[in-house]
Structures are given as structure tokens and as C-alpha cells.
Amino acid sequence: MTWEVVKSYIWVAVGSALGGMSRFWVSNAVGERVGFTFPWGTIVINISGSFIIGVFTALTLPEGKLTSSRIFVTQFCMVGLCGGYTTFSAFSRETLNLVRAGQWLWAGGNVAISIVACLVAVWLGFIVGQILNRL
């Protein structure tokens, strides 16, 4: 294994650790403010993570501002940080828990809000990234 490959794994690992710690902090901060009955923390994380990855996607396009550091940004920020931060598995578990508790309306709301809001967030993040590319 070459040093370049080892560095890639290190960047992904460091990004994942920071993303996971950020997820834990944001989820608890949101839960403490609005309660833990509905998974608002996970929704906030998935929306903000979608926005962030949208920005990085635009910035690493061939015409983007971060083209020269595309590999680092992809490994550290998108795969590591955003991968460790966003919580689709937690979203799935929380939705299952709502269904098992007979909270069908809340489960459906969690699915609808998460999917629509995250798609909008990644699109808006991409637009912001494109604007940053023009500055």
C-alpha cells in the first residue's frame, strides 16, 4: 500500500470521527431544545449535511474553486466528514421505532420531511457552491 493510499484512509478516518462527534453534539443540542419525542435532531443533521455536501460537490467540479484539492475535499469532507455526520441509518431506525410504536403519522412525517428537505438542501448547497465558484 502506497503512502498516498494510506493518507486517503487517514483523511477519511479523521473526517468521519469529526463528523460523528458533530452529529452527536448537534443531535443532542436540538433534542434538548425541542425534545426527543420526534427525531428533529436527525432531520436537522441530514438537511445540513445534504446542504454541505451540495456545496462541496459544486466546489469540486472541473470549473470549481477547489478543483486543485478535489481528492482531499472528496476524501476528508464528503466521504469522511459528511459520511460521519449524516445519519441515514439513524433516520431508518428512528422511523422504524415510530412505526413499531404505532406512530404512523410521525413516521410518515419523518420520511417526507427528511427526503424532501434533504433533496432541497443538496440542491441549494450546490447553487451556493456554484456562486462561490464565481467569486
Image (spheres, helix red, strand yellow):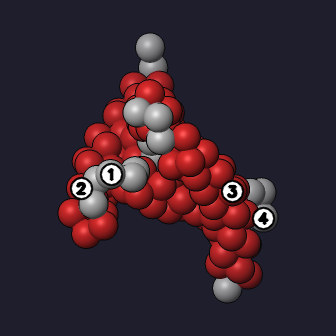
Image mark count:
4
Cβ–Cβ under 8 Å for marks 3 and 1: no
For marks 3 and 4, the one nearer the N-term is 4
**What element does badge 4 sit on?**
loop
Cβ–Cβ under 8 Å for marks 2 and 1: no
The span from disc 3 to disc 4 (Cα, nearest Å) is: 28 Å
Residue 58 is situated, as x and y percent measured from the top left of the image, at 70, 62
For marks 4 and 1, the one nearer the N-term is 1
**What element does badge 3 sit on?**
helix
Q: Which amino acid does label 1 sit on?
A: Thr
Q: Which of 8 and 36 is in front in this view?
A: 36
Q: Residues within 10 Å of mark 3 (few under 14, many from 20)?
A: few
Marker disc for residue 37: 1
Residue 79 in sight: no
For marks 3 and 1, the one nearer the N-term is 1
Residue 44 in sight: yes
> Would residue 35 appear left or right of 93 to someone viewing this image?
left
Kindly identify the residue that appears in the image at 78 percent across and 64 percent down. Answer: 63
Determine which residue is flagged by label 3: 116
Q: In this view, does 46 lie above or below 99?
A: below
**What element does badge 1 sit on?**
loop
The span from disc 2 to disc 3 (Cα, nearest Å) is: 23 Å
Give the number of the mark in front: 4 or 2. 2
Q: How crowded is mark 4: few (under 14 residues within 10 Å), some or many (20 or more)?
A: few
> Would residue 86 appear left or right of 67 to someone viewing this image?
left
Q: What residue type is labelled 3?
A: Val
Q: What residue type is labelled 4?
A: Glu
Q: Is residue 61 above or below residue 11?
A: below
**What element does badge 2 sit on?**
helix
Determine which residue is flagged by label 4: 63
Marker disc for residue 28: 2
For marks 2 and 1, the one nearer the N-term is 2
